[in-house]
């Protein structure tokens, strides 16, 4: 049994909350005094292209709330700005910490970072203790009979359910907050108010949803009251049908265990959302077992695939001027809010990969730049699924038709009218593909194709055949 510790640090990364917190619970159980710390990682921040990146605002506001809650306990959040490989060992030395507790992160950069932090801590007589928190079952826990990780989601989900024991896997981790180090014993220079956003090189921006643990709990409560409609409403972008919890899951303002509890409490009504949570687990499992997917297709047959699309088409896709209204509405929504409903993420991604015939990694990187809820494993897995190059992808001959997707999931054109207002006057039958509308309706609606709204930049039927042929040749 490990010897009790005198002082420890709890290093927050993707777990910006106090409740159901595996790392903080472990730290306060093992230690007499625990300080909570967050490092603004310059290696991550330096890669962000936008100084008003919404994720930084979300993180900062979540930290402000968390700091307020810590202060109510007589403690405070410690903050550093720099390279965690240097900052965490230095802070541990200054605080006299014998251990640093943190939630395990499965992204390639994080794995390398944590290994180095662990080595440096060991060199000064301390240790890094990583615990499971961001998933229910991590890479290596759900394996086939041969001991290999699963490639197909259906097989993974079946094995996951077989091994799942709710009373063990969803146990609530309750920190002993009375063991938090008192604020007067912490270095005031490292308190959050001394690190305004401007000081770390960013500006605050508006968010489409509130940040922080309280907001996450409120959103979960709101979703609980409508989860029975999730399967029906979740695909319709003009409906308020999604959980809107992906951002909170990404930054850990709610625990993954609480989300699974919510789904299970809803019984049959929560089955569809439970499946979505399992897709998240699956993609984390794939990334953890096959980190190479962060850079290249899981399916090695497509590693050297040359995409024949015209690069000039990438910009119209980015800004929402492709001539396909549902794609344009989706991209404009993303650019304006940092959010896009999951159904439209698939539609927009399919259009880039199989209509424009551009490398999926271009779109993956753009989503990574713009999505408030960006998660490497989920974003990468979804893009590879749509592009038919992933661990468990849609067949290469399946190409989403943006017009029929629009007609099916935005039948009245409400979402299109909101985000592509120049088409608002068109009828529900014409708004999905304006170039097929009569000249009379276009004129009456104030639309001059090619001027007020672009003509389609590609012909879907022709590009569909090209995409099918491309993948046939590749295999």
Image (cartoon, rainbow, N blue to C red):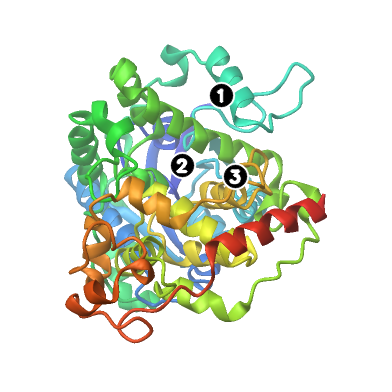
Residue 21's spot in the image, x, y percent?
38, 34
Q: Which mark sits nearer the N-terminus, 2 or 3?
A: 2
- Residue 187 position by quadrant: bottom left
Crowding at mark 3 (Cα within 10 Å: few <14, some 14-19, many 20+): many
Residue at disc 2, secondary structure: strand
Q: Residue furthest bottom?
A: 451
**Identity of the residue drawn at 42% across and 66% down:** 370
Q: Mark 2 = which residue?
A: 8
Residue 60's spot in the image, x, y percent?
31, 61
Residue 2's spot in the image, x, y percent?
57, 24
> What's the mark number on residue 157?
1
Residue at disc 1, secondary structure: helix
Q: Is residue 429 above or below residue 442?
A: above
Crowding at mark 2 (Cα within 10 Å: few <14, some 14-19, many 20+): many
Q: Nearer the viewer, residue 363 or 210?
A: 363
Residue 368's spot in the image, x, y percent?
49, 62
């Amino acid at each position: 049994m490990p010897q009790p510790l005198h002082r420890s640090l709890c290093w927050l990364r993707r777990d910006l909350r106090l409740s159901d917190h595996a790392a903080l619970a472990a730290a306060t159980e093992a230690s007499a005094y625990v300080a909570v710390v967050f490092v603004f990682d310059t290696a991550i921040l330096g890669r962000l292209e936008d100084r008003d990146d919404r994720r930084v605002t979300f993180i900062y506001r979540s930290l402000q709330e968390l700091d307020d809650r810590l202060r109510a306990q007589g403690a405070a959040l410690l903050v550093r700005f720099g390279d965690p490989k240097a900052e965490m060992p230095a802070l541990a030395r200054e605080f006299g910490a014998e251990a640093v507790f943190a939630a395990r992160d499965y992204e390639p950069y994080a794995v390398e970072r944590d290994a180095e932090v662990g080595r440096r801590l060991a060199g000064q007589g301390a240790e890094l203790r990583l615990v499971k928190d961001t998933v229910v079952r991590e890479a290596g826990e759900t394996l086939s009979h041969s001991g290999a990780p699963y490639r197909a989601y259906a097989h993974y989900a079946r094995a996951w359910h077989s091994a799942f024991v709710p009373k063990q896997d969803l146990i609530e981790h309750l920190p002993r907050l009375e063991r938090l180090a008192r604020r007067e014993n912490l270095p005031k220079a490292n308190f959050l108010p001394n690190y305004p956003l401007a000081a770390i090189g960013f500006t605050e921006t508006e968010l489409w949803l509130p940040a922080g643990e309280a907001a996450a709990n409120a959103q979960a409560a709101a979703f609980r009251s409508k989860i029975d409609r999730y399967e029906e409403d979740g695909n319709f972008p003009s409906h308020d049908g999604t959980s809107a919890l992906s951002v909170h899951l990404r930054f850990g303002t709610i625990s993954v265990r609480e989300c699974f509890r919510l789904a299970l409490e809803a019984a049959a009504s929560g089955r569809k959302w439970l499946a979505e949570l399992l897709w998240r687990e699956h993609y984390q499992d794939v990334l953890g077992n096959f980190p190479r997917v962060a850079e290249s297709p899981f399916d090695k047959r497509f590693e050297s695939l040359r995409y024949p699309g015209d690069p000039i088409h990438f910009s119209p896709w980015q800004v929402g001027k492709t001539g396909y209204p549902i794609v344009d509405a989706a991209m404009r929504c993303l650019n304006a809010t940092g959010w896009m409903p999951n159904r439209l993420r698939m539609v927009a991604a399919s259009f880039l990969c199989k209509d424009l015939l551009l490398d999926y990694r271009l779109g993956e990187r753009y989503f990574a730049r713009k999505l408030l809820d960006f998660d490497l494993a989920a974003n990468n897995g979804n893009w590879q699924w749509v592009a038919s190059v992933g661990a468990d992808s849609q067949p290469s001959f399946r190409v989403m038709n943006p017009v029929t997707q629009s007609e099916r999931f935005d039948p009245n054109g409400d979402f299109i009218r909101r985000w592509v207002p120049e088409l608002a006057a068109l009828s529900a039958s014409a708004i999905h593909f304006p170039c097929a509308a009569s000249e009379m309706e276009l004129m009456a609606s104030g639309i001059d194709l090619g001027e007020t709204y672009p003509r389609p930049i590609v012909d879907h039927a022709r590009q569909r055949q090209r995409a099918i042929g491309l993948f046939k040749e590749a295999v």
